[in-house]
Amino acid sequence: MALAREVFEMWEHRPVGWSRGGKMEPQGRILDGNLETLGLQSTLKMLALSGKTGVLSVTSGQERLAIFLRNGHIVDLDEPGTPAPDLIDMFRLLGRIPPQRAAELRRLAGANPATAIMIMVQLQLCAPDELPRRTEFRVIQAISRAVRWERGRFEFHRDISPIQAPGGPQQLFNVDHVLLEALRMADEWSRSGSLSLTRNTVARWMPQFNGDVTQLGLGREEIDALCLSNGQFPLHAISFALLVSEPQVATIMRRLLELGLVEVVDAHLEAELERSLVNLITQSQYQLSQETRSHAEQRMLALVRTMGACVNGLLTHHTRYARMLRGRGEVPQREVRRYLEATFGPVLADLERSFPRMDEVVRFSDGRLDYQELETLEKVVKGAELSDCLWDAVRLCSHFMRIVFDRVLNDEVGNSRVGHQFEDLWSAFLREIDEDMARLAYRRATTRVQQERAEQARPGVVSGVPQAYGVAPDGRRRLS
Amino acid sequence: MEESVVLVVDDSPTVRKIVQLTLQRERIRVVTAGDGLSALAAVADEQPDLMLLDIMLPRMDGYNICQVVRKNLAYRDMPIIMLSGRDGIFDKMRGKLSGSTEYITKPFDSTELVQTIKRHLETPAARERAAQRMASRQQRLRRRV
């Protein structure tokens, strides 16, 4: 074990220039800019052609990456914020290391996967080329993620030595080869865009599965992925352990999900999603509980405001958590709006065919539901026509809000446990809306009956002849 | 650690569900009641560690519930958090006078709600109450066996 200890000490060194907080020192910066003007591919290619040595740091929203170069070749890569995969534990679960050896390895290597691999090579538990193979795989995976970032910044700091350890085994990776593989992998992610899984998704075995796994016809990689689905390792860690690309692991996980062998847990995403949706529904419920004893028209307008604000809240929430927009760093607002309008615009257009009065009154613009026209509707129409218009608006908003929520939830969490919890919560909120609408419908019907009786009681009125609506001249034109 | 029990009294099923969902994530058991009288029955049956109480309730309002609960010696120290859409100084003062421990204004933020509840549940008195409840539950179970 003495040799292993030496290796451990050698690999404990961190790259120079990348401080603990992930911030770069300002000196030595020779190139910086926006990813919109110069993409990551072009920047890397340029640095490779000029044979540069240093570190290229890229940031997009919350995502960060540092690529270390030596003489125009990639030597290593750092992903601040992404915890190192627990390779020892994963190898133990895969049966590649006996449990007692795993404990010993952990004591020696700590949490550093590179050290663990080096020791395993020394102990002949791994092939001698295991470390360079895994480093190359990790570099390609990370760059395949970064090439999908459209917005963000990059900086290149020259003459920063990638690894301080003198004489440490270091492989140079050709930038062209890495880029080609990364782009191929990015394509795979785009193709699997319909999957609800992200690289941080964690899967865990279904406790109630009673079937025989051997009868399911699972392949080698599927069995390995199943072994690692213990609710602790994220998708990217499983990908690193199996040396199978992240989109492929996502496809395997989907199959395991379909077979009912695992369930998906993305604790961080679920917690954020839950907080966002719970706060939104709390706000909406509070808004709904206000002005309950107002006039019928005012109450209808209040309901429209509540549901409109809820729809807009859901849309804002969806811009952060939609599957299409996740994992892409900072997405341009224009694209976000286009996505929302393409997803929900046709739904509103369809609904408006059932409520023709609402055409152009309630519309979808700039990725938001615009119902401002309803606020000034009383200046345009009055009496029964105003009441009918507002009732149509209430029903339209109610239908639209339900559809938006269903689509948002289905897209973000799919058929998961957290999804079912929200369905329960949403049902409770909808029950309150429905009760309010039922009360309004009753009030409207009562008012109508009273008006009809009053009309019939008035002398000279012939039953069955339509009465003139109290519509203002311009309102009649707009709403006919 | 003993499991904490929180009683949520609100006439809105949405608010009850929201609090339930938020607190379950923190491994806190939630019991709910939709009106004043059910709330008093739940206090006697479940012996909660904390009560989240809305003011506007059918059959008996939050202030009255608070006063009735405080009259019972066994629940004199139980934290009662008023949860209301009214944020005037008069309402807060009335809540305080009727015996509430804290006042949270609706619409509340789920993180703040959890922090406030945890602050009250992590006191030695709350832990002792949870232990007592567990002991009495075990005793009842033994008697039944």
Image (cartoon, coloured by chain):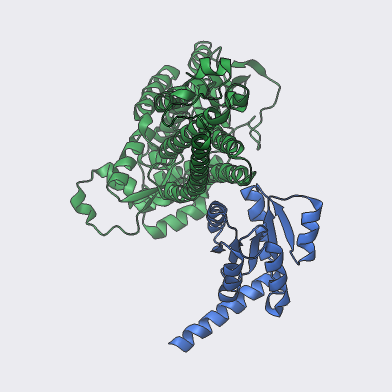
Give the quadrant of residue B72. Answer: bottom right
Residue B91, can we see it?
Answer: yes
Q: Where is residue A254 in the image (x, y as percent from the top left)?
A: 32, 41
Q: Position of residue A342 (x, y in %)?
A: 43, 22
Name the residue rendered at 59%, 76% in the picture: B44
Q: Tell me what residue is drawn at x 65 percent, y 53 percent.
A: B113
Q: Nearer the viewer, residue B13 or B114?
A: B13
Q: Position of residue B86 (x, y in %)?
A: 72, 50
Q: Which residue is drawn at 55% across and 33% down?
A: A308
Please give the name of the residue rendered at 71% of the width and 21% of the height, measured from the top-left corner.
A27
Asked if residue A147 can be seen in this view, the reply is: no
The one nearer the camera, A208 or A333, is: A333
Of residue B29 and residue A150, the one placed in the foreground of this image is B29
Instruction: Farthest residue to the front: give it.
Output: A459
Which one is in front, A46 or A337? A337
In the figure, is residue A127 to the left or right of A315?
left
Q: Colour of chain B?
A: blue
| Residue A22 vertical position relative to residue B28 in the rendered view, above or below | above
* Figure chain in green: A
Q: Residue B119 appears in which quarter of the rendering?
A: bottom right
Q: Position of residue B93 (x, y in %)?
A: 81, 58
Q: In this view, does A271 lie above or below B2?
A: above
